[in-house]
Image (tube, rainbow, N blue to C red):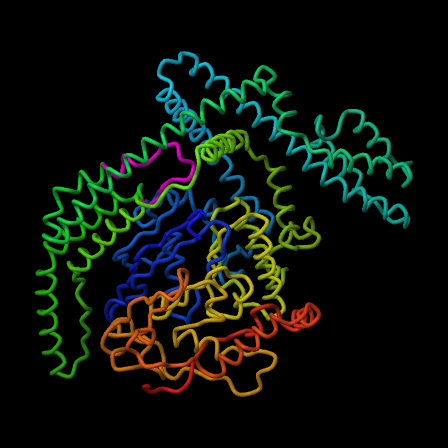
Amino acid sequence: MEQLEKKLQVQNLRISFKTAAGKVQAVRGITFDLYKGETLAIVGESGSGKSVTSKAILGIQAANALTEGGEILYDGMDLLQIDEQDFCRLRGDRLAMIFQDPLSSLNPIMRVGKQLTEAMLLKSRMRKNNSRTAFRERTHLLEQTMQTRFPERRDLARQMEQYRKMETALGAAEKASTDARQALARILPLLERLCFLKEKNADTAGMPEKILDYAGHARHEDALSEADLQDLRSALDGAGKTPDIRPLLERMQAILDRKPTREALLKRSCPSFTESDEAAFRADAQAGIEAAMERFAKARKEAVSVLESGLEALKSGGIEAVRPHVASMSGAVARCIDPIDPVRDSRACTFAGSLKKFLRTYEDGVRHNAGRQVRYEREMKKAERRQAQGKTWTVPAPSIIDLEQVRANMTGLIEAMIQHLNTPQKMTGAEKTEAVLSAIHESALGMVANMTPWEARERALRLMEEVGISEPEKRYKQYPFEFSGGMRQRIVIAIALAADPDVLICDEPTTALDVTIQAQILELINRLKEERHLSIIFITHDLGVVANMADRIAVMYAGQIVEYGTSEEIFYSPAHPYTWALLSSMPDLDTKERLEAIPGTPPNMIYPPKGDAFAERNRYAMQIDFEQQPPRFQITPTHWAATWLLHEDAPKVEMPESVRHRIEKMKARMEMPSRAATDCQIQTSDKSSFGKCSTVRPAKEGQA
């Protein structure tokens, strides 16, 4: 897992809400990482903090929300510190979300086609400008890197200018070729349909005009030539018969099958930049990047030394003692950041800002804690007098800053930074060079990606087909109320995918749908993840929903993650009583006995429990569960649980027999011969022999 690219990092996130009754602690110090191309499922009962976490990632928290600590790191930014303007660049572009109720996500009086294309057209110009800026910055940084390695070379500026012109011309040629071939791909099914209608002597009105419209956009040397267009017009006239169209259809399919190579596009768009020129440029770029990697590796070692000095001062003398070290620590970490790195080091980029944020929080607490406590005590006395008079009076809890918690947060930040800098860099010079040049090429493509209304419409139709909406041209003109619930959710998914996001957050997207449609939507999300290499956070209260789609699962209860592991570990080796409760409440095809339920309700998070939040509802709770919060007990490198049952001195407690029986049954099915496995898949898919689960509750209350 360490070798995968981290797309999103949530570190010690704490979020509360101001209410008249007091401060509701909704999220209490959760930490997780989202890796590229994986699905992370966050599972828990309503009120556990799942949706609050997702909204914090998108910056759409409620007005009374208080972010009391933590970091959300994405692409070199802390999402808890950026402003609304920066969030607007990210939302719907690189970060997208699918909400629970599709009808509330759509405008009821706007056609779905308009809703699909509106964001595309608005984002197109901004993306083009951002790509142009990124192209200039990346090529400039690459030139500086090469000049540092070869200070005596006078031809590098000319070489880089040639490379810029080549990438710009190649990007334009690739965009034109791709657009023309996409238009050609739209023609083929229409010609097939036209042949079918002509064979049946059916009405073909309007189809020739539509085909010729696409043909006009498909005119390109990699798609349709002028001769092809002339043949197509002749075949589509009133006298055209099916035998006239079939050979043309086969010829167009052959054209579409011949994909233009990068070498051909380069030779055509920039003949002066030869393959030998490109090879020489790549060699110089790699030499410069490898030299830079050596410099930054040395800087990382120096930064670790500076950080260790600051950490020692913090542990021995507190925050006041570490103040003189803040500037040196921030500067040392900043010198470790390679600006040309295509994947920004989020932890290093946000270190200085996080350090200053903790200092500001500490200063605020030192300055105002005493006054806030005095005001609270004064209000409490007033409330006691009014209560004595028979009046009801509620005093909200004071917003006292826990100075020891701030110190602990700062300690954790520095320790994590030291561990991060000590982690060996696994990317080779050749791999990094390829990544840098690929990023430059993507920026060059973005500079010419000026989307027209016609292109936006075509992209919307392709997206509708991709998410499984039949007759997209007809559906394009309809209103949301004309769709079923499942079809509306497909439209919402298409809108979320319109900008090719990096991270897709699914906030209970199947809750409002029936079981059959749920399965279709889950299968669709799974397929899109594989095809588009998406990173997905899937939020649900239904553990059975994520059985066959999650790579890793975080089980949340009362604002904390109580168990975390791979999908197989959570389903086959659960360790927390709450996870046992979730599994034991899930129906399957073979279960006939009554499902178990959790007595009681989740705790009041205005006054969180002192110990384990699940203790009051846990039949296996011990005395220590009511007194101290359990730490994380590591079970495997990828699996941990926060329960005192895993302590070496705890009594041996076995998981419930109903859960054990289901696990054994599932393992037996997995070991069956292929025929039996096939029969099993017909009845129930993979780990979902656990079935679908509703909101969970384990067995009777009591203590072990």
Position above or below: 528 against 148: below
Q: In the figure, residue 636 lies in which quadrant?
A: bottom left
Q: In front: 548, or 148? A: 148
**Residue occupying the point 24% across, 39% down:** 303
Q: Specify the quadrant of the image occupied by residue 260.
A: top right
Residue 203 % position (x, y): 85, 47
Q: Is residue 474 left or right of residue 521?
A: right
Q: Position of residue 556 (x, y in %)?
A: 38, 67
- Residue 175, image x, y percentages: 60, 31
Is the residue 45 above or below the residue 66 in the image? below
The residue under the point 54% across, 18% down is 277
Q: Main secondary structure of the magenta part?
A: loop
Residue 340 drawn in magenta: yes
Q: Work out which quarter of the rendered image holds the C terminus and state it.
A: bottom left
Lateral position of residue 545 relative to residue 312, left or right = right
In the image as oriented, which residue stretches furthest toward the top? 154
Q: Would residue 76 appear left or right of 362 to someone viewing this image?
A: right
The residue located at (36%, 86%) in the rendering is 701
Total labels: the figure holds 0
Q: Is residue 592 magenta?
A: no
Name the residue rendered at 15%, 42% in the picture. 325
Q: Is residue 332 above or below residue 624?
A: above
Q: Where are the magenta residues, as a range?
A: 332-347
- Where is residue 271? Give x, y as percent: 61, 17
The answer to which of 538 and 483 lies nearer the viewer is 538
The one nearer the camera, 624 or 116, is: 624
